[in-house]
Amino acid sequence: MASITNIVYYPAGMALFCLEGWLLSFILPFHAKQHAVELRSNRQVPLDGLRGLLALGVFFTHVLSYYYYHLSHKWDFPPCNWGAQLAVAPVCMFFYITGYLFWSKVRKGSMLSMGRFWLSRVARLMPVYLFACGVVFVYAASLSNLTLRVPAKVLVMQIASWMANAKFTDLNNVSDSHLWLVQAWTLRLEWIFYFSLPFLRWFGRRLQNTLLLFLLFAVISGVGQMAGQGATTNDFASFAVTYSHFFLHTFILGILVASLPLGRFSRFARGPLATIISLALIGAVLLIVPPRYGVLETCLLSLPFTCICLGNTWWGLLSSRSMRFLGRISYSFYLLHLVSFTIVMELARNYGLLAGIRPLAYWALSCGVGAMIVVVSAFSYQWLEYPFLHVGQMRNALTVAEQAHSHVPVSGLRTR
């Protein structure tokens, strides 16, 4: 029988999720309508499909991490390289996508005003995050039988810290509850990027300015690594060094792809040879490269990511109906999957279903739980994401239309 870390479980599980995504995109009326709308839009479809693959990759890592946590009560990366890289490489690529999409707006001059931009980001990201926090709070309350295990003031501070995504501690002294939303650390880096973006517009005006930004963060990261060796994990300087590292090794790739003149490369990037090379490089990252969020991952993933940005769909996979659906719900799935998985698996453990469970049965159970989380995420997108997609943009667009009707110049306004 195959071991728990046999890589064959990954493509088998992905096939099941793709089938589910394809079925749900027809069954759920809202998503069937969204698919029709997206077909008429100018969205970069391969990037949407890529998001679905990335979120599911993180899920597979957490499936393995939970298996070993069940045995040792220690949360860590799984002991196989591909299992760990299914979290590390997707997180890197999520940051590439963020850098690429928003720097493209900076380059085109289509950024919203500072206040509207920040408002749009809060409205886009916070509803699902707060809902995920709510699930965590309710689950922690149920495990503590609605009794206070810490002073009320301490519990209020813990809840506030969680809601602000400042620091995750064990809620109400419930053991290991800080792990239930552990993947949300990436949102902190996203928020710093969004906060800094309006101040970085000058660097987007010309390629030379963008290269200067790259050099600036390289210096900050290098100096920070040398000067911050003694900083504690909670120290502001340590976080600044961490952000500089991720900006230099992840966000900057998306920024460079958005800035460089790659048009002449697009024909090759969409071709079968580019697809083969891209998949080979991704395979090398999964199987060989140590999971470190470092320069080696970015060097090997730069070609696959660039080809996707230029329209490569991996022989249609990334533009398929199922991957569009999975990409659409990827943010909700990313935030909700771990706490949801933990709740169900802890329930199974309490009933003795995990005792001596075989690898195939564990993976079958995990994929079944994942399938339920996909359904929950589909409704989360419909109710907690979609209604807020254009907050901060509608009023700006109306202002542009009103001024155009009055023949008033609107050169300083940006609609997106």
Image (cartoon, rainbow, N blue to C red):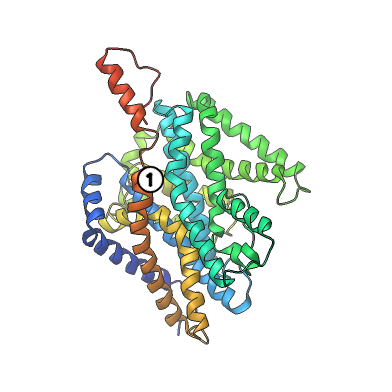
Residue plotted at (50% across, 70% down): 342
Q: Identify the element where label 1 is drawn.
A: helix
**Residue 183 image position (x, y, % from top left):** 54, 57
At x 35% / y 29%, what residue is drawn? 395
Residue nearest the viewer, comparing 33 with 89: 33
The residue lying furthest to the right in this view is 230
Instruction: Name which quarter of the figure residue 180 lies in.
Output: bottom right
In this rendering, would 167 be left or right of 109? right
- The residue that disc 1 covers is 307
> In the rendered view, does 233 fall on the left or right side of 123?
right
Q: Out of 134 and 282, give the one closest to the viewer.
A: 134
Q: Position of residue 72 (x, y in %)?
A: 63, 77
* Residue pictured at 48% horizontal, 35% vertical: 118
- Give the amino acid type for the residue marked by disc 1 in the picture: Cys
Q: Quadrant of the C terminus?
A: top left
Whether residue 6 can be seen here: no
Indicate the position of residue 133 as horizontal and vertical percent values: 51, 57
Q: Position of residue 153 (x, y in %)?
A: 67, 55
Q: Residues within 10 Å of mark 1 (few under 14, many from 20)?
A: many
Query: Quick one: 196 or 392, which is closer to the camera?
Result: 392
Task: Tell me if residue 175 comes above or below residue 88 in the rendering.
Answer: below
Who is closer to the viewer here, 354 or 22?
354
> Can residue 60 be seen here?
yes
